[in-house]
Amino acid sequence: MTETVIDYNEGKVLLIDKPLNWTSFDVVKKLKFALKVKKIGHAGTLDPLATGLLILCTGKMTKSIEKYQAQEKEYTGEFTLGYTTPSYDLETEPEFQAKTEHLTIEDLKEATSNFVGEINQTPPIFSAVKKDGKRAYSLAREGKEVKLNSRVVTISEFEIISFEENKAKFKVRCSKGTYIRSLAHDFGERLGVGAYLSALRRTKIGDFSVEDADNLNDFVKNNKVSTNDRP
């Protein structure tokens, strides 16, 4: 039986379920070594604290990256209400803002209507957006004041799935450039109690689903490369 040899330099689209605490670039470097390809890139960054669908293009297919980046994204995750963080997620320490016992799931569902459609959204200061030629997160980590301009994004669906104690499970479908961390922060402000993003998983990009994605370690093992360390 002849083993099929895939020429990744010729061009392939790969679906990977990004592990927690890996950067998107970590995955790119790992697969570049594993597949021995000259050109590989991803179609849309996921934060290290997020998991889920990462589309990677190799070889000639890297020309299609912008096409995939432009497609609608779907996310599921969790907001923690009553607290905020400077990074809008768990990269920085939570600070208590307000009690949440008075809130009901109906209150949260009603508040979602303010974030559906075209909205103005300001990226988190702990983001890769450039300010004065430097990444905003670099300035923020240096303790410098960072002011970023808002941008128009589109949220086509924002659903609260459950609400227990101060944890809200959600699903969002949105355009390129949407920061779910900013949505968490703004949602908490709308409710008057504050909030931050405590879990995030990207489930879809266009017609691609995380259900069809490969586990990174399994994919690398199948290509006979060590999985013990990051690149």
Image (tube, rainbow, N blue to C red):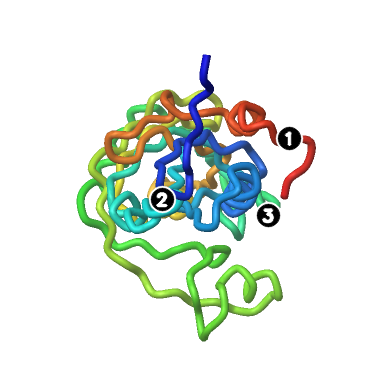
Distance between mark 1 and mark 2 Cα atoms: 35 Å
Q: Looking at the picture, how far across and down is residue 176, in whole percent?
A: 33, 54
**How far, Cα to Cα, is label 1 from label 3?**
29 Å
| Whether residue 189 is visible | no
For marks 2 and 3, the one nearer the N-term is 3
Residue 229 lies left or right of residue 199; in this view the side is right
Contact between marks 2 and 3 (CB within 8 A): the answer is: no
Circle 3: is it few (<14), some (14-19), or many (20+) Cα within 10 Å? few
Q: Which amino acid type is shown beneath numbered disc 3?
A: Thr
Query: Residue 190: x, y in percent?
Result: 38, 50
Is 36 left, or right, of 188 in this rendering? Answer: right
Q: Position of residue 56 (x, y in %)?
A: 46, 46
Query: Are dots 1 and 3 in contact, CB under 8 Å?
Result: no
- Whichever of labels 1 and 3 marks the residue nearer the N terminus, that label is 3
Which label is found at residue 227? 1
Query: Which mark is drawn over residue 92?
Result: 3
Front-most of 142 and 5?
Answer: 5
Q: Nearer the viewer, residue 30 or 147?
A: 30
Residue at 35% across, 69% down? 150
Going by the numbered disc 1, the residue's amino acid type is Thr
- Residue 183's tag is 2
| Residue at the limit of the structure toward the front, as seen here | 1
- The spot of residue 15 in percent (x, y) is 45, 36
Q: Which mark is residue 98?
A: none
Task: Report the residue at 41% width, 25% height from top.
Answer: 212
Contact (Cβ within 8 Å) of mark 1 with mark 2: no
Q: CA distance from mark 2 to mark 3?
A: 17 Å
Residue drawn at x 37%, y 33% is 171
